[in-house]
Amino acid sequence: MNDVRIYTQINSPYQVLDASGQLPFSVIFGLCRQSPADTDPRPLVLEIAGSVLDVPTERWRDAFTVYQCHIDANGVLASILEPGKKYRIRLASEDLGVKRWAYGDRKQFIDNDWKPSHDSEAVKLVNSRPNAGNATFTVVKRLSWPPTIETRMLLCASSSSSDSALANTKLSSSTALEVSVINTSSDCVTVQTRGHQRFLIPRGPFQPEPDADDDRMRIIDATPRKPPTSSLQVVDSTTGEVVRGNKKRGTGPLIDVNADRRPKTEDLVTLKPGASVVRKIDIGSLVDGLEDGQYKIRMQSRGCRWWHGEAGKEQGGDGRVPAHLCEIIVPPLMLESQDEVELRIRDGKIDQSM
């Protein structure tokens, strides 16, 4: 039997490796059985550093098993990586270096004492691609981390006042969702609430993880446009089913590669230490058409680009954040809340008697 060829794709989850170890870093291997000669219907189980990967036989783009090789910040490999330098990890040859593998399931591969239960296949597992990709990253001594932000949600009566905190000036229902955000740190920070968000996002073998790269308006955006409800979900309290807000984001309009991607200062919100930023959000479109019953509103986590201090005061004269601030890559500041807001729909409207 000839060597068994495995489709292999290598990537890194982030563009940087944090030498301090605060941001976990791995080398990602995407493995798939794509060879026409590999016709055995059984799963293929292989032994790598004490772990077992179960590679199924399916349509190849739906059949990738992802294996993450964690790099310990205090380990041997990390010790030879120097801050400020860029590195690339790739396959040295087509041989994947797997010492033991077999067709079958995990129970057939090892016994209860974690010892081999039968002989390994004799042929090698090799990469089927001329280029398996690579994990490319730059080492930084220590990343700058965002402060902890506390986000609370509650229902409130909407108002026709001219309060600038309203997320939409034409509330379509008599009930709004009040979202309050508090910067719990002792430092002032600036947060980007809309437009292209540039921060560290985790990637898989081919592309960013689902929902990691999302440029839709964040929930604390204050402009009088469409209410920023993209991070909200409505859940049926009886069944637990998500009935609203589970749509995947669209690709959005095409952007000229030469377009200025720096955020405008009007896209920024300053969060001062201990001070609350409050938004009242029209949820009329979110609950419109719901059947009578009991529901909960939840908030999905969304990351934001952020800067220490008041970045809006450092504009370069063109109403945008200066280029030198945009070049700094940071982990995202997360807008998230554990609150679940209860509401009842009666006769097609929000029951305010709760």
Image (cartoon, rainbow, N blue to C red):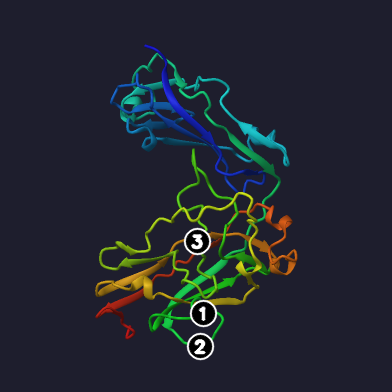
Residue in view at x 54 percent, y 31 percent: 133
Contact? badges 3 and 1 (CB < 8 Å): no
Specify the amino acid type for callout 3: Arg
User: How far across and down, in percent of the image, does residue 48 sit?
Assistant: 47, 28
User: How far across and down, in percent of the image, does residue 302 sit?
Assistant: 50, 60
Q: Residue 87's quadrant in the figure?
A: top right
Q: Judging from the image, what secondary structure is the residue with disc 1 in?
A: loop
Q: Earlier in the sequence, mark 2 or mark 1?
A: 2
Q: Give the CA separation, mark 2 to mark 3.
A: 26 Å
Residue in view at x 60 percent, y 53 percent: 199
| Crowding near the residue tagged with mark 2, few <14, some 14–19, many ≥20 C-alpha atoms within 10 Å | few
Q: Give the CA separation, mark 3 to mark 1.
A: 18 Å
In the rendered image, the vertical position of residue 30 relative to residue 160, given as above or below: above
- State the residue position of label 2: 161
- In depth, the one of 75 and 115 nearer the eye is 75
Determine which of the numbered discs, if any, sits on residue 216 in the image: 3
- State the residue position of label 1: 166
User: How far across and down, in percent of the image, does residue 64 sit?
Assistant: 41, 35
Residue in view at x 37 percent, y 31 percent: 55
Specify the amino acid type for callout 1: Leu
In this rendering, would 121 be left or right of 49? left
In the rendered image, the vertical position of residue 37 relative to residue 86, given as above or below: above
Q: Judging from the image, what secondary structure is the residue with disc 2 in?
A: loop
Residue in view at x 58 percent, y 38 percent: 71
